[in-house]
């Protein structure tokens, strides 16, 4: 379901279940956590999460719902497995980019929101259908949605359960970038620009963004990261590269 490849600091996590439009079965959430652990151990400096032009992720696998209907313990296991996997994606200390084409629904939207940045094709479609199914949505994912689009648009998406296109998703802030050209090339160019920057800086900045999104205006560890960066070899090397030959003596 989750296929991980790593090349030159770029980890690429592809959802690979085309027969189900990349819907995620209950048993597959743990494999997402495993893939993320592997990506972090590899030393990768950026992670791209993508599906294919048929679907980014159609959501949770509806064929599992009969089991959830009859087994309260399994419902709890499913909720916690999904929560753990998405929390792992949010917390991985490298920039993450969701590259979205085709359908992105339900749990697929939650997966995209757990990434730091979202790029979508004009052909992408988005929907949050739990109310149409008689379901709710995990509170941590409601919070992520409200953080991105505001409470009013979150209410519209969840209450109505309608499908919106890529242009509307960009307009309301569900995605940050929309492209009508080659989606893979656009994402690769964006990733390359990030990879050119300091991994130390990126980790600190990602942590700061997440703290700010959670309402933190100050943090002792962020203060330490800010100050210690001035003494880093990374800064010294990058400053040296920026000096003109005449300044280097």
Image (spheres, rainbow, N blue to C red):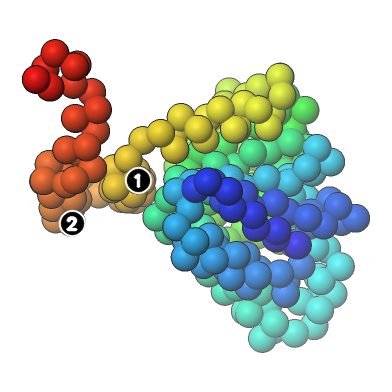
Between 128 and 174, which is closer to the camera in this rendering?
A: 174
Q: Position of residue 43 (x, y in %)?
A: 45, 57
Q: Quadrant of residue 85?
A: bottom right
Q: What residue is drawn where x is 18% and y is 21%?
A: 243
Q: Position of residue 126 (x, y in %)?
A: 71, 38
Image quadrant in which the C terminus is located: top left
Report which residue position mark 2 lands on. Answer: 221
Is residue 112 among what the camera can see? no
Report which residue position mark 1 lands on. Answer: 199
Q: What residue is drawn where x is 62% and y is 79%?
A: 76
Between 63 and 137, which is closer to the camera in this rendering?
A: 63
Outermost residue toward the top in this view: 246
For mark 1, give the secondary structure: helix
Q: Quadrant of residue 157?
A: top right
Marks 1/2: CA–CA distance: 17 Å
Few, some or many C-alpha atoms within 10 Å of disc 2 (few <14, some 14-19, many ≥20)?
few
Q: What residue is drawn where x is 82% and y is 57%?
A: 17
Q: What residue is drawn where x is 78% and y is 42%?
A: 52
Look at discs 1 and 2 and give the one toward the viewer.
1
Q: Position of residue 161 (x, y in %)?
A: 73, 43
Q: Quadrant of residue 78?
A: bottom right
Residue 149 as seen in the image, left or right of residue 203 = right
Q: Which mark is residue 81?
A: none
Between 116 and 47, which is closer to the camera in this rendering?
A: 47
């Amino acid at each position: 379901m989750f296929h991980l490849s790593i090349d030159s600091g770029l980890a690429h996590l592809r959802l690979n279940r085309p027969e189900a439009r990349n819907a995620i079965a209950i048993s597959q959430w743990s494999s997402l956590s495993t893939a993320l652990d592997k990506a972090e151990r590899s030393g990768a400096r950026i992670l791209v999460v993508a599906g294919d032009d048929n679907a980014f992720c159609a959501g949770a696998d509806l064929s599992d719902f009969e089991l959830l209907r009859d087994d309260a313990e399994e419902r709890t296991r499913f909720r916690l497995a999904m929560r753990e996997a998405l929390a792992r994606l949010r917390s991985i200390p490298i920039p993450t980019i969701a590259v979205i084409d085709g359908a992105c629904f339900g749990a697929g939207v939650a997966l995209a929101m757990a990434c730091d940045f979202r790029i979508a094709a004009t052909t992408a479609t988005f929907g949050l259908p739990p109310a149409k199914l008689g379901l709710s949505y995990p509170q941590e994912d409601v919070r992520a949605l409200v953080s991105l689009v505001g409470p009013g648009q979150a209410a519209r998406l969840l209450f109505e359960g309608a499908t919106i296109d890529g242009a509307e998703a960009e307009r309301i802030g569900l995605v940050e970038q929309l492209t009508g050209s080659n989606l893979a090339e656009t994402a690769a160019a964006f990733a390359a620009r990030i990879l050119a920057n300091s991994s130390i800086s990126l980790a600190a900045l990602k942590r700061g963004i997440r703290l700010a999104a959670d309402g933190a205006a100050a943090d002792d560890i962020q203060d330490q990261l800010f100050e210690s960066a001035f003494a880093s070899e990374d800064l010294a090397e990058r400053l040296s590269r920026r000096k003109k030959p005449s300044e280097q003596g």
